Image (cartoon, grey):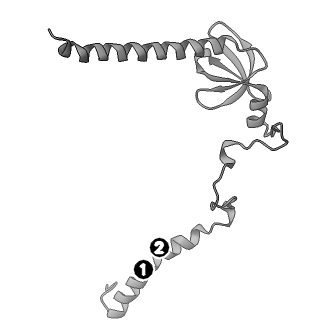
Amino acid sequence: MSLVTLLPFIVLIGAMFLMTRSAKKKQQAAVQMRNDMQPGTGVRTIGGMYATVKEIQEDTVLLEVAPGVHAVYAKNAIGAVLEDAEYNRIVHGDDELESDGTVVPDDASSLTAGEPADVDVAKIDLGKKAEDADAPKDAEAEDTKADGKGDAK
């Protein structure tokens, strides 16, 4: 066999090795993060729910999802352990100040120039669009009635 024949196999094996090594490192980091959890820390589950850790067992975690509401989750369901400042900003709406005194925006408030800053959903008139959509049908019905072709019984 020549080197040209073996080159694709060597590249494929090398790529597979690098991918599995990367995945293994990510998995080890996730296990370490879950092992570093302490009661009282804020977490985000893989489903996107924010809660506070109350108790840690071997394979499960007791989370307080709302004041007085507790739920048992598998440790593997914890997607991220959050710092106190980040947890309070997300859950309680506390704005963290940067060193220069400016407010750190959350992800949703970073609008680009030209986009409307606030949209009042209560002021959107959805009924008007429905009336406009029915208008051509009503006009067509009026034309057929006027011609004497519509609704003949």
| Residue lying at the far front of the rendered structure | 3
Residue 58 lies, in percent from the top left, at 65, 6
**Residue placed at 81% from the left, 44% from the top?**
102
Q: Does 139 sit above or below residue 128?
A: below
Closer-to-camera residue (12/44): 12
Residue 11 point in image, percent of width and height: 30, 17
Identify which residue, 44 or 11, lies in the foreground: 11
The amino acid beneath tag 1 is Pro
Q: Residue furthest top?
A: 58
The residues bearing labels 1 and 2 have C-alpha atoms spaced at a distance of 7 Å
Query: Relative to 93, does residue 119 appear above or below in the rendering?
Result: below
Which residue carries the number 1 mark? Answer: 136
42 relative to 25 in the view: left or right:
right
Q: Position of residue 115 (x, y in %)?
A: 63, 60
Residue at point 65%, 53% (across, down): 111
In the rendered image, residue 122, in percent from the top left (x then y), is placed at: 68, 63
Asked if the residue under mark 2 is in contact with the one under mark 1, i.e. CB atoms within 8 Å, the reply is: yes
Q: Quadrant of residue 99?
A: top right
The secondary element bearing badge 2 is classed as helix
Task: Return the residue at label 2.
Answer: 133
* Label 2 crowd bin: few (<14), some (14–19), many (20+), radius 10 Å: few
Which residue is farthest right? 101
